Image: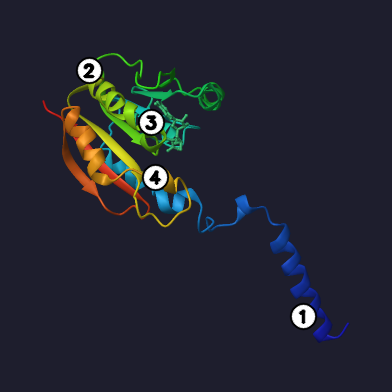
Amino acid sequence: MSANRVVRLSAVLCLALLVTLPSSLSAQPKRDSRDTWQQPDRVIDDLNLSPGQRVADIGCGGGYFVFRMAKAVAAEGKVYGTEISEKALKSVKDRVERDKLTQIEPVLSGPTDTKLPDACLDAALICNVLHHVPKDQRAALVKDIARSLKPGASLSIVDWRVDAKIDHDKDRRIPRDEFLQLAKDAGLTLDAEFHYLVHQVFLRLRKSS
Ligand SMILES: C[S@@+](CC[C@H](N)C(=O)[O-])C[C@H]1O[C@@H](n2cnc3c(N)ncnc32)[C@H](O)[C@@H]1O
């Protein structure tokens, strides 16, 4: 076989390998995959969680943050993952059972009632949920989350920026100041605001101690 033919054959083989390589094995995450813009590790760091704490992910969906929060509070802590969707909660429950993550408690909630005990939480997160909640129910939901915070505990709101350059939920995004008003009405004050998420507002609010 001529050298030229060997080179061409190798190039074809390399191309075929690249095409068939499962995406999960490729080192780079897809450019638009959630982890690239959500920066979950940095968000978790800014929730300031520590082992043994009781925390909640309100509207946890399929558990994107619940499992990361569970790692941060460790086996001696507790994470309530609340959801109004039984289907979403089931996928969390299945993984909790499979991986024996005893610190996670999935909770089927009402639209404005988290079903969490009073003053039980050190921290709560509500990520990409409030824009799904009808406008006339948002204040009641945030007040109910505040009810379940201990004095001095935090609620972090992460949600789309009004001008986010992403296609999701363009018609129901909530202005930043409306989040602050919801927090104020629930007795929470701004503790920190983070600007590194390209698509989302990130406000950490605190209940007075
Ligand atoms: C876009 S998903 C976000 C899920 C998750 N927080 C995340 O960041 O991946 C929105 C979730 O909020 C839930 N949801 C909507 N309204 C809710 C409410 N009032 N209380 C709790 N969950 C709610 C929906 O069922 C859905 O699973």
View extreme (right): residue? 1
Which residue is found at the position 37% from the left and 29% from the top?
57
Mark with earlier residue (3, 1): 1
Mark 4: which amino acid? Pro
Q: In this image, 118 relative to 69: left or right?
A: left
Mark with earlier residue (3, 2): 2
Mark with earlier residue (4, 1): 1
Labelled pair 4, 2 in contact (Cβ < 8 Å): no
In this view, the mark in front (1 or 2): 2
In what quadrant does ligand 1 lie?
A: top left
Q: Quadrant of the C terminus?
A: top left
Name the mark on residue 134: 3
Crowdedness near tag 3: few (<14), some (14–19) or many (≥20) residues, C-alpha within 10 Å: few
Q: Nearer the viewer, residue 204 or 98?
A: 204
Name the mark on residue 119: 2
In this view, the mark in front (3 or 4): 3
Quarter-wise, where is residue 173 in the image?
top left
State the SS at label 3: loop
Mark 1: which amino acid? Val
Give residue 145's position: percent from left, percent from top.
28, 24
Q: How far apart are marks 1 and 2 (CA)?
A: 69 Å
Name the mark on residue 40: 4
Q: In this image, 178 relative to 64: left or right?
A: left
State the SS at label 1: helix
Name the mark on residue 7: 1
